[in-house]
Amino acid sequence: MGFDEKWVPVTGAGRDGLRGILAAPGDAVVALDFDGTLAPIVADPSQARAHPGVRGALGVLTGRVGAVVVITGRPAALAVEYGGLAGLPGVVVLGHYGAERWEGGEVSAPEVHPGVAAVRGALPGVLERVGAPGGTWVEDKGRSVAVHTRRTAEPDRVLELLRGPVGELAAEHGLVVEPGRLVLELRPPGVDKGAALTGFLRERGARAVLYAGDDLGDVAAFAAVEKLRGEGLAGVLVCSGAVGDAPVRELAERADLVVDGPEGVVELLGDLGEVLTGR
């Protein structure tokens, strides 16, 4: 296939997916999560920045595959800023799990779900009532609200403490809870990375896709690729992380290839770009 052996998927479906990408790159989409995939996970999400090799790797790929799309729970404009993606032709960012779209320097989006404003106002009282400890932090994403426990002394215990009350609050206002790495995100229903990815692939008429993610929010995208494989799409599922890393264990077990975090993702994308450049 022209790849370093370490990038060859361990599954037959993954190897078929890679062959599909290499055979017709113009009909292929490279789809990527942001946090934990293109950018290392950090305690303060506002300090997250893409791996320094991301822009170069994507710059090569955009001219050789049908499309490059970043699908993230973040606002699209923030992902562009933190990822250094502005000015990269052909890159599309689907923010808020697909509710926002950045393309060609412009962001488009529907109206914000009214439940978001309601939970934004109610969350502080809920956290106080259940005794959320210091370090519990609420992130206002505009179209969703996230409660982080990473900064607390016992982040896993606090996450479990909050799961029920936060879920009840979300349901009361017509929202759903998306769990992640030490975070509970309250967002509108029917918006997830699987739906966003499926819609984008159909829009582009893609015949092959490589999707890379690291977190529970990426499970829906993995499931979407698995479903589309049954319809004839060639797909490669990449987990950014380690098999023993609990937050990504489900992804690692379903992945065709596991790489070593954002650095591994960048190396993989860089090698893919080199192989396609040499065609």
Image (cartoon, rainbow, N blue to C red):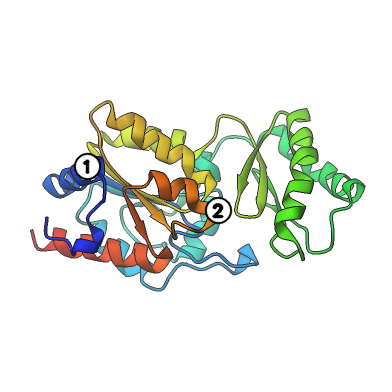
Instruction: Pick out the residue farthest to the front.
Output: 244
Instruction: Pick out the residue farthest to the left.
Output: 279
132 vs 222, left or right, is right
Mark 2: give few (<14), some (14-19) or many (20+) Cα within 10 Å. Answer: some
226 vs 116, left or right, is left
At x 41%, y 47%, the residue is: 253
The image shows residue 133, relative to residue 263, as above or below, that is above
Identify the residue position indicated by label 1 in the image.
Answer: 12
Quarter of the image for residue 138 reads bottom right
At x 26%, y 45%, the residue is: 11
Mark 1: give few (<14), some (14-19) or many (20+) Cα within 10 Å. Answer: few
Q: CA distance from mark 1 to mark 2?
A: 25 Å
Instruction: Pick out the residue farthest to the right.
Output: 129
Q: Position of residue 85 (x, y in %)?
A: 41, 62
Residue in front for this viewpoint, 87 or 59: 59
Q: Position of residue 103 (x, y in %)?
A: 41, 49
57 vs 19, left or right, is right
In which quadrant of the rendered image does the N terminus lie?
A: bottom left
Identify the residue position indicated by label 2 in the image.
Answer: 247
At x 52%, y 42%, the residue is: 97
Is residue 101 visible in this depiction of the protein?
Answer: no
Mark seen at residue 118: none
Residue type beneath disc 2: Pro
For marks 1 and 2 on the same chain, the one whose residue lies earlier in the sequence: 1
* Element type where label 2 sits in the image: helix
Q: Position of residue 113 (x, y in %)?
A: 67, 34
Q: Position of residue 119 (x, y in %)?
A: 78, 40
Figure label count: 2
Instruction: Pick out the residue farthest to the top.
Output: 231
